[in-house]
Image (cartoon, helix red, strand yellow):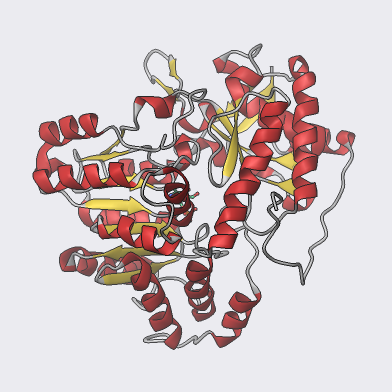
Amino acid sequence: MRTIIEPFRIKVVEPIRMTSREERAKLIRHAGYNPFRLKAENVLIDLLTDSGTGAMSTHQWAGVMEGDESYAGARSFFKFEAAVRGIFGHAHVIPTHQGRASERLLCRAVVKPGDVIPGNTHFDTTRANIEDAGAEARDLVIAEGRDPDLDHPFKGNIDLAALERCLAEAGRERVPFVLITVTNNSGGGQPVSMANLTGARALCDRFGVPLLLDAARFAENAYFIKLREPGYGDKTPRGIAREMFALSDGVMMSMKKDAFGNIGGVISINSDEWADKVRTLLILTEGFITYGGLAGRDLEALAIGIEEILDEDYLKYRIASTAYVGNNLSAAGVPLLKPIGGHAVYLNGRKFCDHIPNEQLPGWSLSVALYEHVGVRACEIGNVMFGTQDPKTGAWTWPALDLVRLAIPRRTYTQSHMDYVVEGIAELYQHREEIRGLRFVHRPAVLPHFTATFEQV
Ligand SMILES: Cc1ncc(COP(=O)(O)O)c(C=O)c1O
């Protein structure tokens, strides 16, 4: 059979609400032309993020009822610890409430002003937390990873020559760790190869610097390795994941993605000294070391989810269903980032809206038009998120890519939902010259995309 089906059936449903185009035009104007500011009930198909938006399984919901809500030493923690350690394999497992809490704790614990953190492409909250600690987040993705039209099996790879130069220049004194994000979300959900991780490990060994992974989408990365890297076709996703993590000294993870959690995160590390520092900070702001800001029921759901995600039937469906959306959009002529990533399809905002200059935020304008046109919410990862303005001259520096991410929540939408999305975007593409540019009304200094407001030009 060529047809790849959803490897689950639906037991509980949540209605979604149709709105008219006129209604949506008013709603997005009231939201300051910022899709983050919309009420979710006014969104028909929500592709803003795949983070925390997945559907839990019957096993996970059963686990919720098993949650041990003891303050310290809860049974649920030990299940969580065993599940995480069984995959990542590090000495210390520290739960946190979500990915950015892991980032903040680790940055506070081990990063000092003037440090440099090299990575493939740092996610926005990772970058913000590194910068908040006074350090530089340096993106060193391979050149192919910055070309949206180029087909390459592992566009998330870090440029090993650039990493070597960075390590030689800054030295172990100024590089507390190297951080590789698998898959590379901000670079288009593109995977990192085992060969690349092995190369990074060798460099880290040579310079005496720890190698950490941002493992938010580790299972999707493992499945891409199985599909694309010679020698891995017969290995299980779990075996591949184990091999990836054996190359690392630690992991930061948002468990809202590849652990099927609605909330949750983890730090998994080998260093006793770092674990000590992180746990001290954890108690200060998150909670005791056996719950880290989560309820016992969350820990149960995550312990089950992180195992479920490695199911090969699920991963096959996941990668194929994301590619289905991308391939159909591509067939309709819609410009997008290639190849199709694991969790999302990324529209090329600048090409889609080639009549809108960078200053008028083409990707963001496209995301607004998409909501107005069909009620689909997407997320710009481009000029608004990463553009920077020189405070003296007012001149803007724009990121290499201005993308609009259609992130696909896990096990949440069916193929007909995706057919609707494809049809809507293809239609919008036919009328793209009607999309109007936007300018900032209010631009917060940090992570502007979440709360900025705009007006039409
Ligand atoms: C690669 C990556 N790292 C970190 C985070 C932050 O995680 P959270 O949203 O759980 O704080 C995200 C969230 O999307 C992510 O994609």
**How many numbered circles are shown?**
0
**Residue 136 sits above or below residue 80 on the image:** above
- Location of residue 37 with respect to 67 vertically, above or below: above
Residue 142 percent location from the top left of the image: 34, 29
Q: Is residue 173 left or right of residue 277?
A: left
Asked if one can make out residue 232 in the rendered structure from this viewpoint, the answer is yes
Position of residue 151 measured from the top left corner of the image (x, y, whole percent): 49, 28
Residue 334: image quadrant is top right
In percent of width and height, residue 182 lies at 40, 48
Which residue sits at x=81%, y=37%?
374
- Answer with left or right where residue 234 lies relative to residue 54: left
Taking the view exactly as shown, the residue that stands out farthest to the front is: 1
Left or right of residue 403: residue 390: left
Q: Nearer the viewer, residue 298 or 445?
A: 298
Where on the picture, by quarter, is residue 89? Answer: bottom left
Which x, y percent locates residue 219? 46, 57
Q: Can you say whether 298 is above or below 323 in the image?
A: below
Q: Quadrant of the C terminus?
A: top right
Residue at x 42% of width, y 34% of height: 155
Q: Is residue 396 above or below residue 238?
A: above
Q: Is residue 35 visible?
A: no
Query: Of 244 and 117, which appears nearest the observer?
Result: 244
